[in-house]
Image (tube, rainbow, N blue to C red):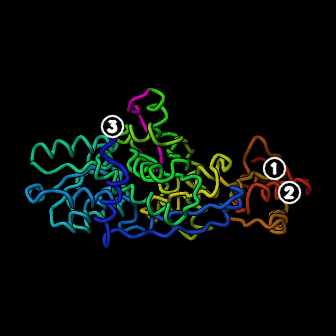
């Protein structure tokens, strides 16, 4: 990785002047309260194309020769790199073909086409798309643009690290969502070149985490399978270049659960007024899981905000459930006039909001004069849910969760 250092990252920033947005670093009082010290959010979800990927893609394409541009470029991506390559190809005047795994988010596909690229769906995982893109490159002569494992791409992503140090010079730790490792490698190389004392930590989705095993093995080791809502960081094998940089310059790589990712997406929307995709929220998820792990002042990078509105709704509901803000109950009540009204009065007085009600009268567990009422309630969190349960049981109701 000696080819990428502070000099190369500063040169990449010059190339990106007027192309990439210097994204804001937002103060986060709610995360600061959780961490017991200052926490800032580096909002790369507000970057052009909705993620940091535009930085590395443009640096890579801007350095192609005229002959290479004439042959066109090809890339593989679940969506964010696709948009970055498509935009960069438009800006430098070359044609782009992008291979996406089946099931890639619709907004990412549409945005990629909107920048003028041709999109081809293939396979289930990013690795399948990578194979197809390389075969296309060999067959047509198009230049393959790797999503993370190239010096120019890493240098471009490293400009995020330079901005972080300028926006918060006193930073003690930087937390970065991590898939193949291009952003993590670039940020670590930039930050450690200037401030070697800063703790840099990568975050992966627990069920798509290739780095912990690879670091333990001492070499990039592919995963046999992945399952995560965080498609932007679902990469089954670290890159050779990115692995070396992470091994040598990153202090730790941690993992977060699907519940934690959903809670983080919800919290960013509610508290920070920022739309994040699950992958982009990974650093915030790690902070919420274990704030003591990250020295403050701390910077959490929100790496992308490209999410299908339908998926966003599902993720937010999942996050509310994970945060204990949905309560599903079976309550046995007397089968008498006014019985349901009395139950709902107790629920209302406890401050819960009724979302759904259903009755079940036929069950071997019920007496002939009883009804099982299934309630879905919205609460303010786990403590409030306990209060609702206590109120129902205090009124003599038989309640099962």
Circle 2/circle 1 CB separation < 8 Å: yes
- To which residue does mark 3 refer? 240
Circle 3/circle 1 CB separation < 8 Å: no
206 vs 221: above or below: below
* Farthest-out residue, top: 217
Residue 102 appears in the figure: yes
Tell me if residue 219 is in the magenta stretch: yes
Mark 3 or 2: in front is 3
- To which residue does mark 1 refer? 399
Question: The magenta stretch spans which residues?
Answer: 218-234
In percent of the image, x 71 and y 65: which residue is there?
A: 354
* Farthest-out residue, bottom: 18
Q: CA distance from mark 3 to mark 1?
A: 55 Å
Q: Is residue 236 left or right of residue 325?
A: left
In percent of the image, x 62 and y 52: which residue is there?
A: 287
Q: Secondary structure at mark 3?
A: helix
Q: Secondary structure at mark 1?
A: strand
Circle 1: is it few (<14), some (14-19), or many (20+) Cα within 10 Å?
A: some
């Amino acid at each position: 990785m000696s080819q990428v250092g502070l000099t190369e990252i500063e040169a990449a920033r010059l190339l990106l002047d007027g192309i990439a947005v210097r994204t804001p670093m937002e103060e986060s009082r709610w995360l600061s309260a959780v961490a017991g010290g200052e926490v800032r959010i580096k909002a790369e979800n507000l970057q052009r194309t909705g993620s940091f990927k535009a930085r590395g893609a443009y640096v890579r394409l801007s350095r192609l020769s005229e002959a290479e541009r004439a042959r066109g470029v090809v890339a593989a991506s679940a969506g964010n790199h696709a948009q970055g390559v498509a935009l960069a190809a438009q800006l430098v005047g070359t044609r782009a073909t992008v291979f996406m795994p089946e099931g890639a988010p619709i907004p990412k596909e549409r945005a990629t086409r909107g920048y003028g690229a041709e999109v081809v769906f293939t396979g289930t995982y990013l690795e399948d798309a990578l194979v197809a893109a390389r075969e296309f490159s060999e067959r047509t002569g198009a230049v393959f643009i790797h999503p993370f494992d190239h010096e120019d791409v890493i240098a471009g992503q490293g400009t995020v690290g330079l901005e972080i140090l300028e926006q918060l010079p006193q930073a003690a730790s930087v937390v970065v969502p991590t898939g193949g490792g291009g952003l993590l490698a670039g940020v670590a190389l930039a930050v450690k070149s200037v401030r070697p004392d800063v703790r840099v930590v990568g975050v992966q989705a627990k069920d798509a985490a290739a780095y912990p095993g690879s670091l333990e093995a001492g070499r990039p080791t592919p995963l046999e399978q992945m399952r995560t809502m965080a498609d932007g960081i679902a990469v089954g094998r670290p890159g050779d270049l990115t692995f070396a940089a992470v091994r040598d310059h990153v202090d730790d790589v941690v993992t977060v659960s699907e519940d934690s990712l959903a809670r983080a997406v919800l919290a960013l929307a509610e508290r920070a007024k920022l739309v994040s995709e699950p992958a982009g929220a990974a650093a915030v998820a790690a902070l919420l899981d274990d704030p003591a792990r990250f020295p403050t002042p701390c910077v959490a990078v929100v790496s992308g905000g490209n999410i299908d509105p339908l998926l966003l709704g599902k993720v937010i509901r999942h996050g509310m459930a994970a945060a204990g803000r949905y309560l599903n109950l079976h309550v046995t009540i007397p089968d008498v006039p006014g019985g349901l009204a009395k139950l709902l009065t107790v629920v209302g007085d406890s401050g819960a909001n009724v979302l759904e009600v259903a009755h079940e009268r036929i069950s071997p567990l019920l007496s002939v004069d009883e009804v099982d009422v299934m309630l879905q309630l919205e609460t303010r969190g786990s403590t409030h849910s306990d209060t609702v349960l206590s109120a129902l049981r205090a009124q003599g109701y038989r309640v099962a969760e």
